[in-house]
Image (tube, helix red, strand yellow):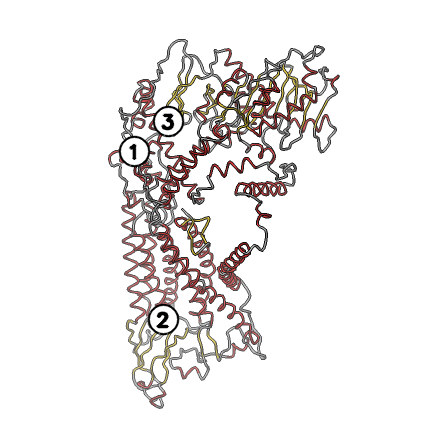
C-alpha cells in the first residue's frame, strides 16, 4: 500500500508495489504458455537441423517436389569428403525461422529475468514502510512499457513475415513445382500461430493506455455530464447509485427470480451508502488494496487467537480444577506452555469457582471481548434438563422453528398448489372471516404441520413489504405469525438499512414507551407494514373475538434472520394488545434494539444463536471495532508482504500463536510513527472519534431478549445450549463455518436433537477459543508439503545445481550440433598426402578447395568448410553408433527431468527419497554422456580403417566437461538426500513443540522466501 503511481494518474491499482508478486505470477504463467508453444517448435527445428531437413538447394525448400532431383551424396553410397564431390549446387542450411526462434528464446529468458527483478524489488520493505521499493519497481515497469514491449512487436513482425515468405511464389516451389507438404498446416503451425497470438496480446497494453487517456481527457474537457453517469451530489450518492445499478443488473441476470422488481434506485440505499462511506471515512483516505485487507484480516485473526490463549492461560493458572482437568487429558504442558507466562502485575480477572456442588447448575466457560480488545474468561449457565423453564424454552424453540423454516419455500408452494389451484403468481391468501373458526379447512398436512391451520398469508415482497403468514397451532394451542427472512434483493436492501431509528412515534401509536428507544430502520419499516396489514385483514381481531373458539390462544411470533428482526419489532408493537405474546427469534441480526430495550424484551423474546453464525454479530459498531483492530494489526506488520503470505500458509499448532505472531508483528509500542500510513491513520481516528460523538450512530444496537447460544463443543454436531449475554456478540468471529451456521433448515434438526445438561456437571470447553489442546506426537515423517514460489527451503545449493545443469546442458547441446567430435587422419587415395577430417554426432565437415592458391592438386590446398553437413540418411553407423545415439537421447531426457525437479525444489519441500531419485537421474546423465564419449568414435565411418588415426575434437572436450559437471551435481544432490531428513523447514519448526521451547528463534534462512 498504496497503489503504485507509474506516471501522473496511471497507477497499478488494485495492486500495490508489494503486490507485484501477483503480476509476476500472472506473467510467469503467461511465459509458461509461451514456453509450451516454443519448446516443441525448438525441438522440431533442432531435429530438422540434425537430419538435414532444413537445407535449401539453390533456394529450393525441401517440401517441393523438385527437391527429390537434388542430392549431394555420391551414387555408390560412400561418404563424400570434398565439397567438389557434391557438385555446383548451392546448399544453404536454415531459414528465416532460425532467427525468429532464436530471438523468441532470448526474449523468453530476458523477460524471466525481468520478472525475477520485479519479484525481488517487491519483497523490499513492509506494507507500511516501502523504503525504495516503489522507485525500483516504477523504473522497471517504465522500462518494460517503453523498451521491452518493442521486442514482442519485432517478434510479431518477424513471425508474420515468415508466414508471408513461405507462402510466396507457390510456397517457394515456383510455377514448375508443387509443394508435397505445406509448412503452414498441422500441429506445429498451430503452435507457431499460438505463439504469435501471445505476442500480439502483450501489445494490447498500448491501446488500453491510449483509451484511458482519451476517456480522462474527455472528462476533463466536460464532453459529457459525469453526473448523469455517477449521480449528482457527493461520493455517497454516487456510491448509492452504483450499488443500485449492480442490484438491478443482478436482478436481470437472475431473470427476476431473485426479486429486484421493486428496486427503483431512488433513495433505498441512501443510508447504507452514507454510513459505508462514513465507516470508511472517505474524507481521510487510507489507500489500501485488496491484498492489504486480506493479510490484515488474517493477522487480526491471529492476534485475536493470541489474546484468547492468554486469557485461558491466566484462567488456568488461578484455577486448580481446570489444571487437574488438563492433567487428566495429558495436556497441561501444552496449556501451561512457557511461551506466554502469566504476569501477576497484570489486571486480575474475577476468579471463577468451578467446584461442583449439589444443586448447582451446569456451567460453561466462554471468552468475552473487553473494551480494551482483550479477552476475559466468563462462566455461563447451561440449560439444565431438570429445570422446567429451560425445558419449556428448548421444546418451544424446537417446535416453532419449523414455522420459521417452512415460510421460505414449503408454505408458499403448499398455498399455490393446494389452496390456490396452481396459480403461477400468488400475492396473498385470505380466507373469509366467517370461515376462520372451521378447524378442518386449510390444514398444512402436506408439509408436515398436521396440527397447523392456515388463516392468512401475504407473499408480497418489496422494500417495505415482507412475506408472512398467520396460522393456528392446535397442538400448542396458540396463534402463530411466521415472518420470512432474507431471500430476495429487496430483503438485502432492507438488511443494510441498519441506521438506528427512534421508536417514539411508534410507541405513542401502539401503546408502549418509545422515548429514547431505537431499532433497525429497515426492519421497522417492514414491521409497520405488517402491523397495518394485520389490522386491515382483521384476522387477529376475529380469531380473538368473543365468538371465536381460539380467543384464549396466546399469540406467538417467530422468524429467522431478517424475519427474526421484523418479528421482534412487531412483537413489541403488538404486545400492548396481546400481553401474553411470545416471540422466538432464530439467528437474528445483531442490530435490532438498543441495549436497554433489548433487556426489557427478555420477558417475551427469546433469541437462538448457533455457534459461529455471522449474522447475530453484524452491527455498525462491530464493524467499527473490526476496522480499528484491523488497522492496528496491519500497522504492526514488520516483514515484507510476500514473506507474511508464506508465513500464513504454513500450518502450525495454535498454542504457539504468540511465538508465530512475534516473528511477523512488532510490539504495539514499536509501531513506527513517521510513516505516511501512520499519519493518515491518526487523522482518520481523530475524525472518526469526532463523528462518533455526534449523530445517530452513537446508539449501539444488540440482539433482543434472552439469548440461547448453541455451541458445537466437539465439532461433531452435538450442541450444548447455554444462556448467553449480549456482550458475547460484540465482535465479528472469523470462522470457516460462520456462513453455514446461519442455515435455518439444519437448525430445525439441531433444536430437535439437542439435549440439555445434566445436574452437577461442569463444562470446561471454550467454544470460541483456538484449538490449543493437541497431541504432540512426532510427525516428522508426515511433514506438510507446501508450495511457496521462490521460497528456497533448501538454501542456495539447489540454485547452484540448477545453474550448473544449464551449463552442462548447453555444453552437451552445443557438442551434439557441432561436427568436431572426432578428428580422423588417414591416407586418401584421390589426393597426395594425409587427409584430416572432423566428424560429429549428427554431422561432419567437408573439405573445400582454397581457390586463392590456384588448382587444388595437393592436400595443403584444401581447408575445412565452415558448414556441417548431415550424414546421408542411408549411411549405417554400425551397432555402436546406433547405441551411442540412443544414449545421447536418454541423457537429454534424464537431464531435463533432473533440471525440472531441481527447479521445483526451490519452491517445494521434497521427501528424502525424492532427492534420491534426483541423484539417480543425475548419475544416469553422467553415465549416458560417458558412454557417448566412450563409443563416440563409432560415429565416424573412417575410424575403422586400418590407416586411420582418430583424435579428440573440440566437441568431445565439451562432453567431457559436461560429464564432470553432471557428476558434481549428482554429489550435491546426494548431499541433500543424506541431510534432507534433518533439513529444517518452517512448518517442522513450528510443529515440534520441544524444539521450540528450547530454542524459540526459528532459523531465518528457512523463513525468507
Instruction: Write down the quadrant of residue 405 in the picture.
Output: top right
Q: Outermost residue, top direction?
A: 358
Mark number, residue 366? none
Q: Is residue 370 above or below residue 119?
A: above
> Which residue position holds label 1?
993
Q: Residues within 10 Å of mark 2 (few under 14, many from 20)?
A: many
Using the image as rendered, state which of residue 745 and residue 881 is in the foreground: 745
Q: Could you tell whether 19 is left or right of 1007 in the image?
A: right
Using the image as rendered, state which of residue 269 and residue 827 is in the foreground: 269
> Which residue position holds label 2?
818
Using the image as rendered, state which of residue 471 and residue 71 is in the foreground: 471
The image shows residue 813 at horizontal and vertical percentages of 36, 65
Q: CA distance from mark 3 to mark 1?
A: 25 Å
Q: Residues within 10 Å of mark 1 (few under 14, many from 20)?
A: many
Q: Is residue 235 above or below residue 172?
A: above
> Which residue position holds label 3?
375
Of pointers 1 and 2, the one earlier in the residue sequence: 2
Q: Nearer the viewer, mark 2 or mark 3?
A: 3
Q: Secondary structure at mark 2?
A: loop
Q: Secondary structure at mark 1?
A: helix
Q: Could you tell whether 319 is left or right of 554 in the image?
A: left
Q: Outermost residue, bottom direction?
A: 854
Q: Secondary structure at mark 3?
A: strand
The image shows residue 196 at horizontal and vertical percentages of 50, 63
Of pointers 3 and 1, the one earlier in the residue sequence: 3
Q: Could you tell whether 744 is left or right of 810 in the image?
A: right
* Residues at marks 2 and 3 touching, judged by CB atoms closer than 8 Å: no
On the question of residue 751 being in view, the answer is yes
Q: Nearer the viewer, mark 1 or mark 2?
A: 1
**Residue located 70% across and 22% down the image:** 537
Instruction: Write down the quadrant of residue 359 in the picture.
Output: top left
The image shows residue 847 at horizontal and vertical percentages of 36, 81
Amino acid at each position: 500500500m498504496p497503489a503504485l503511481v507509474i506516471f501522473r494518474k496511471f497507477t497499478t491499482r488494485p495492486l500495490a508495489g508489494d503486490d507485484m508478486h501477483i503480476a509476476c505470477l500472472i506473467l510467469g504463467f503467461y511465459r509458461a504458455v509461451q514456453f509450451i508453444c516454443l519448446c516443441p517448435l525448438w525441438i522440431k527445428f533442432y531435429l530438422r537441423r540434425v537430419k538435414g531437413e532444413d537445407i535449401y538447394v539453390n533456394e529450393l525448400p525441401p517440401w517441393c517436389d523438385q527437391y527429390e532431383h537434388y542430392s549431394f551424396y555420391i551414387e555408390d553410397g560412400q561418404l563424400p569428403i570434398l565439397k567438389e564431390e557434391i557438385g555446383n549446387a548451392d546448399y544453404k542450411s536454415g531459414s528465416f525461422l532460425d532467427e525468429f526462434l532464436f530471438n523468441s528464446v532470448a526474449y523468453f529468458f530476458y523477460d524471466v529475468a525481468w520478472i525475477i527483478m520485479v519479484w525481488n524489488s517487491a519483497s523490499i520493505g513492509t506494507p507500511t514502510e516501502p523504503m525504495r521499493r516503489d522507485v525500483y519497481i516504477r523504473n522497471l515497469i517504465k522500462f518494460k512499457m517503453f523498451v521491452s514491449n518493442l521486442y514482442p512487436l519485432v517478434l510479431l513482425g518477424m513471425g508474420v513475415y515468415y508466414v508471408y515468405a513461405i507462402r510466396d511464389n507457390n510456397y517457394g516451389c515456383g510455377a514448375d513445382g508443387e509443394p508435397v507438404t505445406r509448412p503452414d498446416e498441422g500441429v506445429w503451425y498451430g503452435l507457431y500461430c499460438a505463439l504469435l497470438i501471445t505476442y500480439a496480446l502483450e501489445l494490447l497494453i498500448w491501446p488500453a493506455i491510449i483509451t484511458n487517456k482519451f476517456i480522462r481527457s474527455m472528462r476533463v474537457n466536460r464532453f459529457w455530464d459525469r453526473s448523469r453517469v455517477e449521480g449528482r451530489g457527493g461520493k455517497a450518492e454516487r456510491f448509492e447509485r452504483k450499488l443500485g445499478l449492480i442490484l438491478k443488473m443482478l436482478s436481470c441476470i437472475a431473470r427476476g427470480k431473485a426479486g429486484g422488481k421493486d428496486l427503483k434506485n431512488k433513495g433505498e440505499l441512501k443510508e447504507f451508502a452514507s454510513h459505508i462511506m462514513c465507516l470508511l471515512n472517505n474524507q481521510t483516505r487510507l489507500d489500501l488494496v485488496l491484498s492489504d485487507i486480506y493479510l490484515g484480516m488474517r493477522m487480526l485473526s491471529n492476534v485475536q487467537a493470541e489474546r484468547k490463549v492468554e486469557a485461558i492461560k491466566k484462567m488456568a493458572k488461578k484455577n486448580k480444577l481446570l489444571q487437574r482437568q488438563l492433567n487428566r487429558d495429558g495436556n497441561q504442558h501444552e496449556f501451561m506452555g512457557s511461551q506466554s507466562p502469566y504476569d501477576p502485575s497484570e489486571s486480575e480477572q474475577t476468579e471463577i469457582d468451578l467446584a461442583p456442588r449439589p444443586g448447582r447448575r451446569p456451567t460453561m466457560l466462554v471468552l468475552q471481548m473487553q473494551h480494551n480488545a482483550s479477552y476475559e474468561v466468563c462462566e455461563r449457565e447451561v440449560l439444565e434438563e431438570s429445570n422446567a423453564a429451560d425445558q419449556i424454552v428448548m421444546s418451544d424453540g424446537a417446535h416453532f422453528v419449523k414455522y420459521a423454516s417452512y415460510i421460505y419455500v414449503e408454505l408458499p408452494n403448499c398455498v399455490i398448489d393446494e389452496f390456490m389451484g396452481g396459480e403461477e403468481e400468488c400475492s396473498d391468501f385470505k380466507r373469509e372471516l366467517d370461515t376462520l373458526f372451521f378447524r378442518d379447512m386449510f390444514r398444512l398436512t402436506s408439509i408436515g404441520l398436521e396440527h397447523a391451520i392456515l388463516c392468512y398469508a401475504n407473499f408480497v415482497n418489496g422494500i417495505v413489504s415482507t412475506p408472512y403468514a398467520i396460522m393456528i397451532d392446535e397442538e400448542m394451542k396458540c396463534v402463530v405469525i411466521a415472518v420470512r427472512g432474507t431471500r430476495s434483493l429487496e430483503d438485502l436492501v432492507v438488511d443494510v438499512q441498519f441506521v438506528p431509528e427512534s421508536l417514539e412515534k411508534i410507541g405513542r401509536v401502539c401503546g408502549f414507551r418509545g422515548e429514547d428507544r431505537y431499532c433497525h430502520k429497515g426492519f421497522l419499516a417492514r414491521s409497520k407494514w405488517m402491523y397495518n396489514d394485520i389490522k386491515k385483514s382483521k384476522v387477529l381481531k376475529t380469531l380473538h373475538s368473543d365468538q371465536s373458539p381460539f380467543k384464549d390462544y396466546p399469540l406467538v411470533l417467530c422468524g429467522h434472520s431478517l424475519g427474526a428482526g421484523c418479528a421482534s419489532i412487531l412483537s413489541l408493537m403488538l404486545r400492548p394488545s396481546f400481553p401474553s405474546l411470545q416471540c422466538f427469534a432464530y439467528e437474528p441480526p445483531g442490530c435490532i434494539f438498543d441495549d436497554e430495550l433489548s433487556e426489557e424484551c427478555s420477558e417475551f423474546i427469546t433469541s437462538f444463536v448457533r455457534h459461529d453464525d455471522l449474522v447475530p454479530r453484524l452491527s455498525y459498531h462491530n464493524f467499527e471495532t473490526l476496522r480499528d483492530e484491523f488497522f492496528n494489526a496491519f500497522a504492526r506488520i514488520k516483514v515484507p508482504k510476500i514473506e507474511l503470505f508464506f508465513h500464513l500458509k504454513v500450518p502450525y499448532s495454535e498454542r504457539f500463536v504468540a511465538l508465530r505472531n512475534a516473528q511477523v508483528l512488532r510490539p504495539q509500542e514499536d509501531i513506527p510513527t513517521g510513516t505516511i500510513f501512520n499519519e493518515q491513520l491518526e487523522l482518520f481516528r481523530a475524525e472518526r472519534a469526532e463523528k462518533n460523538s455526534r449523530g445517530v450512530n452513537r446508539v449501539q444496537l444488540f440482539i433482543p431478549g434472552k439469548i440461547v447460544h448453541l455451541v458445537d463443543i466437539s465439532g461433531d454436531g452435538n450442541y450444548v445450549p447455554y444462556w448467553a449475554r449480549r456482550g458475547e456478540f460484540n465482535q465479528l468471529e472469523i470462522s470457516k463455518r460462520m456462513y453455514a451456521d446461519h442455515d435455518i433448515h439444519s437448525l430445525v434438526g439441531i433444536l430437535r436433537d439437542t439435549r440439555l445438561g445434566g445436574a452437577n456437571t461442569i463444562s470446561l470447553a471454550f467454544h470460541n477459543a483456538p484449538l490449543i489442546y493437541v497431541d504432540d506426537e512426532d510427525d516428522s515423517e508426515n511433514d506438510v508439503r507446501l508450495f511457496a514460489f521462490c521460497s528456497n527451503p533448501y538454501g542456495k545449493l539447489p540454485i547452484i545445481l540448477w545453474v550448473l545443469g544449464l551449463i552442462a546442458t548447453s555444453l552437451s547441446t552445443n557438442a551434439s550440433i557441432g561436427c568436431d567430435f572426432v578428428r580422423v587422419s588417414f591416407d586418401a587415395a584421390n589426393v597426395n598426402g594425409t587427409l584430416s577430417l572432423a566428424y560429429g554426432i549428427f554431422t561432419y565437415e567437408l573439405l573445400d578447395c582454397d581457390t586463392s592458391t590456384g588448382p587444388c592438386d595437393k592436400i595443403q590446398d584444401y581447408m575445412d568448410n565452415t558448414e556441417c553437413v548431415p550424414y546421408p540418411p542411408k549411411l549405417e553407423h554400425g551397432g555402436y553408433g546406433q547405441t551411442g545415439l540412443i544414449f545421447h537421447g536418454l541423457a537429454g531426457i534424464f537431464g531435463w527431468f533432473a533440471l525440472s525437479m531441481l527447479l521445483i525444489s526451490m519452491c517445494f519441500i521434497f521427501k528424502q527419497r525424492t532427492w534420491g531419485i534426483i541423484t539417480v537421474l543425475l548419475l544416469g546423465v553422467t553415465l549416458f554422456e560417458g558412454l557417448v564419449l566412450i563409443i563416440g568414435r563409432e560415429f565416424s565411418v573412417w575410424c575403422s580403417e586400418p590407416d586411420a588415426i582418430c583424435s579428440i575434437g573440440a566437441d568431445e572436450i565439451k562432453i567431457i566437461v559436461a560429464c564432470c559437471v553432471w557428476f558434481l551435481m549428482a554429489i550435491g544432490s546426494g548431499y541433500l538426500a543424506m541431510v534432507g531428513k534433518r533439513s529444517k523447514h518452517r512448518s517442522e519448526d513450528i510443529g515440534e513443540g520441544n524444539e521450540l521451547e528450547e530454542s524459540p528463534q526459528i532459523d531465518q534462512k528457512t523463513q525468507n522466501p
